[in-house]
Image (cartoon, rainbow, N blue to C red):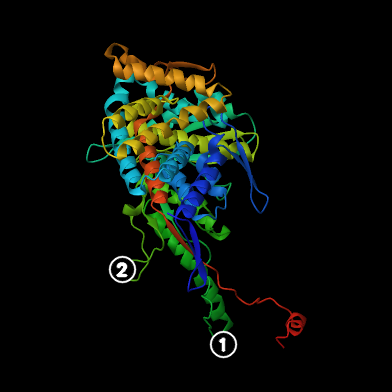
Amino acid sequence: MAATVTPLAVSGERTSGESIRSQNVTAALSIANIVKSSLGPVGLDKMLVDEVGDVTITNDGATVLKMLEVEHPAAKILVELADLQDQEVGDGTTSVVIVAAELLRNAEQLVKNKIHPTSIISGYRLACKEACKYINEHLSVSVDELGSDCLINAAKTSMSSKLIGVDSEFFSKMVVEAALAVKRTNVKGEVRCPIKAVNILKAHGQSSLESVLVRGYALNCTVASQAMIKRITNAKIACLDFNLQKVKMKLGVQIVVDDPQKLDAIRQREADITKERIAKILKSGANVVLCTGGIDDLCLKYFVEAQAMAVRRVSKIDMKRIAKATGATMLLTLANLDGEESFEASMLGSAGEVVQEKICDDELIIIKEPKSRLAASMILRGANDFMLDEMDRSIHDALCVVRRVIESNAVVPGGGAVEAALSIYLENFATSLSSREQLAIAEFARSLLVIPKTLSVNAAQDATDLVAKLRACHSSSQTDSKLESLKWMGLDLVDGVIRDNKVAGVLEPTISKTKSLKFATEAAITILRIDDMIKLTPEEKPDAGQSYQDAVASGRL
């Protein structure tokens, strides 16, 4: 497996053998090292400054990696891996990257010891399958068994490493309340918790403990005119994705008028078209009109007279969510199949109340008791933009974790307990195999210990001592049935001791652990399969922006 770099017949070069594999592993490890120090409840934050000078302060692995402009193709796989974990689970983005990089590091050692990559890949796949099976059978606990505090504890565990970890008691209750507010059961009887129905708004000023949860969908808008009514009960809501402004002639349309009175008639007709549209909407029974575009001052008069509420410049994302929550139809135009304009009552959504309220320092419109599905909104307070953005990310991660716990109804102990238990189990499992995969499974088991080790190092504790004690506990639990309760033992990083994390309430969704193991294994396998890289050199283009003098000097003219 000699490393070679050979030029190609086409313009480019080909790197193959050991060289490309070690390059890929080095790139993956450098990505993991960036986020390693941010893992755990006492992890540190990263400050990222982009090319414009905008600053982001975060310790969310997916956010850090997303903002890095990674060029190496193998390193890009890990960046996409963190993004995938963020979309699927919402939490555990840092740990999934660290595990994937460690799997690659240990696989490279095996390759150097003349073990074929195919044997390593099959061993890793088998180890991942056994690990997920062991988690579900032995380490997973039902939410019903732990009681209602389980959701709050899972949210607290997610927040512990974040900026709002200090106030996790306050925010965890708020997050669980918001998640339960939007919880519903579909026609198949499955529990679903669409967290997109939780709208998060940010407002400067006051402390983070002044943040509030509002029952209903909060819109960061106000009524279009101060003369309008501010509260409407039994609201009928129209969602319009077009302007309600005075109609203008389309570009390119020319009208030759020889009579000045006809010109006045054209102008009057332009104003009347919008008036007729508003009349049709109001006639259908609508008393709240939400519009993504502008509403002309001339048109506001009609809404004020009809005692209706009109809101302009609502964002499209908010509009789609409101339409879903209230059962309204979002309209791009009033035109029907006959080519005429009409608005039917069936297109309206319903809500118990729509009211403009002053919450914190801002005035917001709140849609309470929507007809189709419930909604909740969180208004976050904080000292500055950096803090509010990080709070937003932390709340989103916690919401995702609570959603996963509600939907899957199973949790596992955190604090390195799962990784230590799997490490012992897979080591014993590896010795029962008589094939080459034994070595790969043993390395997989060793790779998992990177999580408890990194957690201990970040907490300024003695990693070797703590991990040794943790492994001893889990080894006893798997060999002696009387000591089975030791399988819940994990790290207490504040005091630097081993404790029962099930009792302490350090819990994570089972699906978070199983998915992160699967994703990390697949990413490691993808990079491990590569033994050849062909890189084409970019085509050189002549400088388009050269001046006349430059062209003369270079001899082109």
Measure the C-alpha gap from mark 1 to mark 2.
Answer: 36 Å
Residue 534 relative to residue 34: left or right: left
Label 2 CA crowd tier, 10 Å (few <14, some 14–19, many 20+): few
Residue 192 x, y percent position in the rendering = 32, 38
Q: Which residue is mark 2?
A: 337
Q: Relative to the observer, which residue lies in front, 353 or 328?
A: 328
Residue 125 relative to residue 313: left or right: left
Residue 143 relative to residue 528: left or right: left
Q: Is residue 38 visible?
A: yes
Q: Which residue is mark 1?
A: 258
Question: Which quadrant would residue 104 be assigned to in this image?
Answer: top left
Q: Relative to the observer, which residue lies in front, 274 or 63?
A: 63
Q: Earlier in the sequence, mark 1 or mark 2?
A: 1
- Split into 4 quadrants, where in the image is the C terminus? bottom right
Residue 386 relative to residue 149: left or right: right
Residue 92 x, y percent position in the rendering = 45, 36
Disc 2 element: loop
Q: Is residue 181 above or below residue 146?
A: below
Label 1 CA crowd tier, 10 Å (few <14, some 14–19, many 20+): few
Q: Residue furthest top?
A: 482
Q: Is residue 208 above or below residue 269?
A: above
Disc 1 element: loop
Residue 38 x, y percent position in the rendering = 55, 34
Q: Is residue 451 above or below residue 252?
A: above
The amino acid at mark 2 is Leu
Residue found at x 41% / y 45%: 111
The amino acid at mark 1 is Asp
